[in-house]
């Protein structure tokens, strides 16, 4: 029968999806699964109370999506400790809904081997042991060899606001995490 929803089939598929995402969420939070967020041409917006990083390399890079390449400031951290984070991304033009997205809030997280593709960052920062003009390939191993880079021992950001198209982390451990499905922009405090 056309146009009819089979609720038992819907419940089964939805239940399997929720169980799968829950399993992945627990595995990612405990560090069993490497985490990578790439927003398919869209922008992930995040804000937080505090970001403390160690072993830092900064260099120019590109985020390649299916349709376009975007310039980015790549920031690589050996270790990161983030407190009071709120992040969200919304995909516009979804049939019927108009827009749909993902919102994540967390009391905080720690991460290792983090790379953030920065489109825009607004913050108050203290950066220690800074070296400008180092070879980006030598500074982190992640940057292009022979290109301009910045290296720092540590950095502390307060009340930051970040726009990014990609984030990767080798290990991430979250505390007090809340995930929401969105139909509009996530309003962070």
Image (spheres, grey):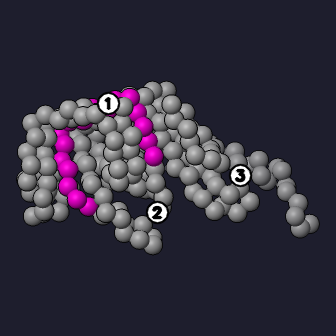
The structure residue drawn at horizontal position 26% and vertical position 53%, both measured from the top left corner, is 74
Residue 108 x, y percent position in the rendering:
41, 29
Q: Which residue is mark 1?
A: 158
Instruction: Compute the Cα span from label 1 to label 3.
Output: 42 Å
Nearest to viewer (mark 1 / mark 2): 1
Badge 3 or badge 2: first in the primary sequence? 3
Work out which residue is located at the far right of the displayed protein and give it.
1
The label on residue 13 is: 3
Residue 73 x, y percent position in the rendering:
27, 54
Badge 1 or badge 3: first in the primary sequence? 3
Query: Dot 3: few (<14), some (14–19), or many (≥20) neighbours within 10 Å?
Result: few
Badge 1 or badge 2: first in the primary sequence? 2
Q: Up-down: is 160 above or below 14?
A: above
The structure residue drawn at horizontal position 74% and vertical position 49%, both measured from the top left corner, is 12
Q: Quadrant of the N terminus?
A: bottom right
The label on residue 137 is: none
Work out which residue is located at the far bottom of the displayed protein and give it.
67
Q: Which residues make up the magenta segment?
A: 45-61
Instruction: Compute the Cα span from label 1 to label 2.
Output: 27 Å
Q: Secondary structure at mark 3?
A: helix
Asked if residue 12 can be seen in this view, the reply is yes
Q: Nearer the viewer, residue 14 or 74?
A: 74
Q: Is residue 154 left or right of residue 20?
A: left
The structure residue drawn at horizontal position 70% and vertical position 63%, both measured from the top left corner, is 95
Query: Dot 1: few (<14), some (14–19), or many (≥20) neighbours within 10 Å?
Result: some
Residues at circles 1 and 3 in contact by the CB criterion of under 8 Å: no
């Amino acid at each position: 029968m056309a146009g009819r929803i089979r609720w038992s089939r819907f419940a089964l598929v939805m239940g399997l999806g929720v169980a799968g995402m829950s399993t992945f969420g627990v595995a990612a939070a405990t560090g069993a699964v490497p985490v990578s967020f790439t927003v398919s041409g869209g922008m992930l917006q995040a804000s937080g109370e505090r970001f403390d990083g160690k072993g830092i390399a900064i260099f120019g890079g590109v985020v390649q999506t299916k349709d376009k390449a975007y310039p980015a400031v790549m920031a690589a951290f050996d270790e990161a400790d983030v407190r009071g984070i709120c992040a969200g991304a919304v995909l516009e033009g979804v049939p019927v809904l108009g827009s749909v997205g993902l919102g994540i809030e967390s009391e905080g997280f720690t991460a290792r081997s983090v790379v953030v593709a920065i489109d825009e960052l607004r913050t108050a920062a203290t950066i220690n042991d800074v070296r400008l003009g180092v070879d980006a390939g030598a500074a982190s191993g992640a940057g292009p060899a022979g290109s301009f880079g910045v290296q720092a021992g540590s950095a502390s950001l307060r009340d930051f606001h970040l726009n990014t198209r990609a984030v990767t982390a080798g290990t991430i451990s979250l505390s007090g995490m809340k995930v929401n499905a969105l139909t509009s922009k996530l309003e962070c405090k």
